[in-house]
Amino acid sequence: MSNTEDLNRVERACADLRRDGQPVTFTAVAAHTGLARTTLYRNPPLRAVIDHHRHQATNTGTLTAITDELATLRAAVGAIAARVRRHEEQLRRINTREPT
């Protein structure tokens, strides 16, 4: 499973839990996504998404909510940047193998 797919699954799980009036917890998200709780805790982008949703309902519009959202966005951008760097490296390797 890719990081992007995991991020999407976690985001959907958090949104579903909030929509249904359920608390967003690592245990609930793990049960909803099928991912291990340790994976959710140890993966910074996934953890940031969960933390964001956990605090969003109580801190909407506060400085804490903005800070949480920034942390989530930074983690997501970091994950995307790492993936782009991997793809660029793969393209460089492919291009050096093929005669032009």
Image: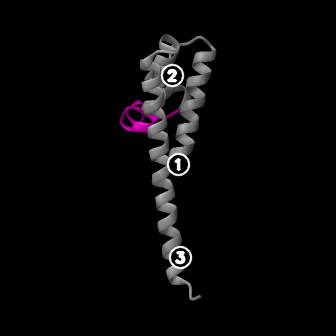
Q: CA distance from mark 2 to mark 3?
A: 41 Å
Query: Is residue 64 shown in magenta?
Result: no
Residue type at mark 1: give it.
Answer: Ser
- Give the structural element (helix, strand or loop) at label 1: loop
10 lies left or right of 47:
right
Name which quarter of the figure residue 26 lies in.
top left
Image point (51%, 65%), residue name: 88
The residue to which callout 3 is attached is 94
Q: Residue at 48% of width from left, 75% of height from top?
A: 93
* Quadrant where the C terminus is found in the figure: bottom right
In magenta, the rendered stretch is 34-47
- What residue is shown with label 2? 53
In the structure shown, which secondary structural element does the residue marked by tag 3 occupy?
A: helix
Q: What amino acid is found at the position of numbered circle 2 in the picture?
A: His
- How far across and down, in percent of the image, does residue 6 sit? 53, 40
Majority SS type along the magenta span: helix
Q: Which residue is mark 1?
A: 2
